[in-house]
Image (cartoon, helix red, strand yellow):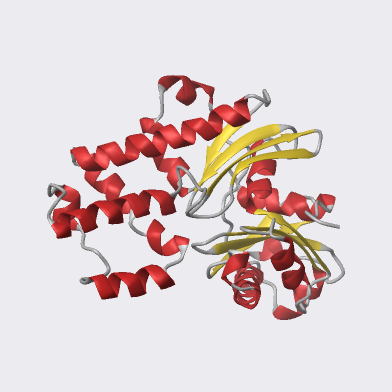
Amino acid sequence: MTATTTPDSSNRTDAGEALYAGVDGGGTGCRARIYRADGTPLGQGSGGRANLLLGVATVRQAVDDALMQALKHSGLGEQDSARLHVGLALASAEHRSAYQAFLALPHPYAAQVLNTDALGACLAVNQGADAGVVIAGTGSCGLAWHQRAITAYGGHEFPISDQGSGARLGLAALQYLWGVKQGWAAPSALSRQHALPFDSDAQAADWLNQAKPGDYARFARPVFDCAGQGDALATRLLQQTARDIEGLLAAVAKHQPPRLSLMGSIGLHIRPWLAEEWQQRLSPPTGDALDGARLIAVHGYALYA
């Protein structure tokens, strides 16, 4: 995995040198990293939620904020934006109308290339070579990358899809907590330590009408915490999440990728809950999603023409 750097004199670049940036964005937030043309990382930044279905203007601001932070961390300034060739790996880029609307917005960069966050993660698995990946974060998706062709599984947005994701796990936790409040579900460590974000039917309706996948995903972390304490209910929820992720892994594995990885915030923590055969089959990625996003820019991997 690529380490975050601290800017120093060795990071100085010639004023005419082309720079690359990788941006990975989803329903919880986005990150950006600046690279030299040879792939050497210079600095990193972060921004707000960057799922295109949240609104392209919102995502544009989040991406720009992350890139400005990354430039500053690299010892560069806003004027260096014009040197950046930006690879954007953003959630929901597969929605053509959102894809086109985002690219129509003005930006200060030398160039930008947009594809999905799933492709960014997959390119990171094997340095851009053939690979397979399941990403389980706020959302989820499986991807096989073979001879520069993509086969995707899942990733059709919460709640119809995103099995094994933080949003689905958080939804299951909220459903259970609501059952405890109504008196038909038995209390557990999860219900004793964590409360619903609403108190009444009316408040529940308001919250559900406004909630985004990232709002549900905030309730995933407590499930892991309570399972670690031996809570049976939390354990069952994680077992179901693991089975869902294994289903995505099995779909991707049919393509016989030379390297198969599991990534994302849920993927990072769910591994002990997977069957032993999958724990043995998985390999760590050679880079991270930001490295993959950089390759989107380097190779011009635009999702749509």
Residue under the point 76% across and 80% down: 79
Lateral position of residue 136 relative to residue 109, left or right: left
Q: How many marks?
A: 0
- Could you tell me residue 189's position as x and y percent? 15, 48
Residue drawn at (40%, 57%) of the image: 217
Q: Is residue 283 visible?
A: no
Name which quarter of the figure residue 114 lies in. bottom right
Instruction: Please state, as top left, top right, bottom left or bottom right, where the C terminus lies in the image.
Output: bottom right
Tell me what residue is drawn at x 40 percent, y 35 percent.
242
Residue 266 locus on image (x, y percent): 43, 45
- Residue 102: image x %, image y %? 72, 71
- Residue 195 lies, in percent from the top left, at 21, 62
Decide which of 17, 236 is in the foreground and name it: 236
Q: Is residue 102 above or below residue 189?
A: below
Does 18 sit above or below residue 271? Answer: below
In the rendered image of this protein, does residue 105 appear above or below residue 253? below
In the rendered image, the quadrant that contains the N terminus is: top right
Which image quadrant is residue 258 in?
Answer: top right
Tell whether 183 sits left or right of 47. left
The residue lying toward the viewer, choosing from 196 and 231, is: 196
Left/right of residue 46 with respect to residue 190 in the rendered view: right
Residue 191 visible in the displayed image: yes
Q: Nearer the viewer, residue 249 or 81?
A: 249
Report the front residue among 257 and 165.
165
